[in-house]
Amino acid sequence: MKLELGYIPIEDIQFNSVSKIENGVLYVNAEELKNLLLEDENIESVALHIAKPGDSIRITPVKDVIEPRVKVEGSGGIFPGIISKVDTVGSGRTNVLKGAAVVTTGKIVGFQEGIIDMSGPGAEYTPFSKLNNLVVVCEPIKELKQHAHEKSVRMAGLKAATYLGQLALDLVAEDIHSFETYSIKEGIEKFPELPRVAYVQMLQTQGLLHDTYVYGVDMKQSLTTILYPTELMDGAVVSGNCVSACDKNTTYHHLNNPVVQDLFAKHGTELNFVGVIITNENVYLADKERSSDWTAKLVEYLGVDGVIISQEGFGNPDTDLIMNCKKVEAKGIDTVIITDEYAGRDGASQSLADADVSANAVVTGGNANMLIQLPQMEQVIGHPDVVNIIAGGFDGSLKSDGSIEAELQVITGATNELGYNKLSAR
């Protein structure tokens, strides 16, 4: 399967009477977009804000980040099973508004959403401070249940990103990147001497607003399965979770998965990138055993020499990570795991809740317990009062002058377990 991504560079974002892309500027008709989002009867009000790199702006609580894309050639449409009908995606051509994002905010759970600072020390910990962001603030109708609130905010973000992506439908991208995965037979014939490598992506599916959607289906209702890597780039996987901000995979992360990008960069020269296995992270032991058994079975079935496994979240999912690693290694297949650490503020505690000697090749995204200081910002978009209760914050985190003292885990994407960040450890 082959997919071409056409990058449409976005260097600025502005409100305008007409929504369009012109000379690298994304113009947004705020009233038109708000009216679209207010079609959801569970949303009481919508406010749109612009946050650019270097602005003295803090966004909190952040629910999701989504990169606008549009399918211009090939089957299906962006975010299949949710926005578009259920067609297999991952082929043809998709235009990408590179440098732009939709950021959704919502006081949904209260304790597991994050912060994006557009400037200052906090901006250095998140990739989203480098983007031209359209921030969507949705306020729900009274007494709306949390699950319905989460769905409304999730859908608002996807609708907004689709609306912006459509602006690039007829644009011709000068910067085009091609990605192709061959069938098992074709790959063996084409690269007989190259090591075969697969990527196992663990998806957050613990329920209670800890969900990830694949072609519109809650992944906890599915068994471990196989995707073409390019399906991720067309929005087949969508974030629907409210977990600790530092290591959750937003929809933007799924669309721009760096493990997939790096494997494609070496595909056909140093290795044969066979494909992606997606598996869920469960709460109960029997479910963890089932999913990890299937992971090891599919890895063996693909006949690979090496596997990269990435985690999402921490604590309970550490067990899924180690189970996957142990069972794949037991098949005689070399395995590298990607995680982050909760090693205490001094870094001296055990980093993971589970461990095994077979997990001897580990990449870490940093220590989420590290204490950080965030200065006051001129503008706060959202609800600053949640800072004292979000994961990584504590009573007194939000100071009277608007500055914040908290653990690194309050920053969206700071210790991302796909490696989409700047931190690691040796």
Image (tube, rainbow, N blue to C red):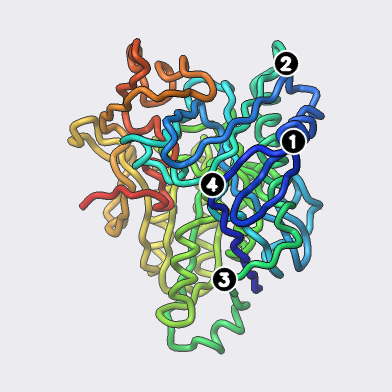
- Would you name the residue on which mark 4 appears? 203
Total labels drawn: 4
Q: Nearer the viewer, residue 89 or 201?
A: 89
Query: Residue 141: which disc?
Result: 2
Upstream in sequence: badge 1 or badge 3: 1
Q: CA distance from mark 1 to mark 3?
A: 30 Å
Q: Is residue 207 visible?
A: no
Q: CA distance from mark 1 to mark 2?
A: 19 Å
Tag 3: residue type? Answer: His
**Which label sits in the foreground, 3 or 2?**
3
Percent of width and height locating residue 392: 36, 26
Classify residue 404 by image quadrant. Answer: top left
Q: CA distance from mark 1 to mark 4?
A: 31 Å
Tell me the SS state at disc 2. Answer: loop
**Which label sits in the foreground, 3 or 4?**
3
Q: Is residue 420 left or right of residue 171?
A: left
Please say if the residues under marks 4 and 2 sit with CB atoms less than 8 Å apart: no
Upstream in sequence: badge 4 or badge 2: 2
- Would you name the residue on which mark 3 appears? 177
Tag 1: residue type? Answer: Leu
Tag 4: residue type? Answer: Leu
Q: Residue at x 79, y 54 (%)?
A: 86
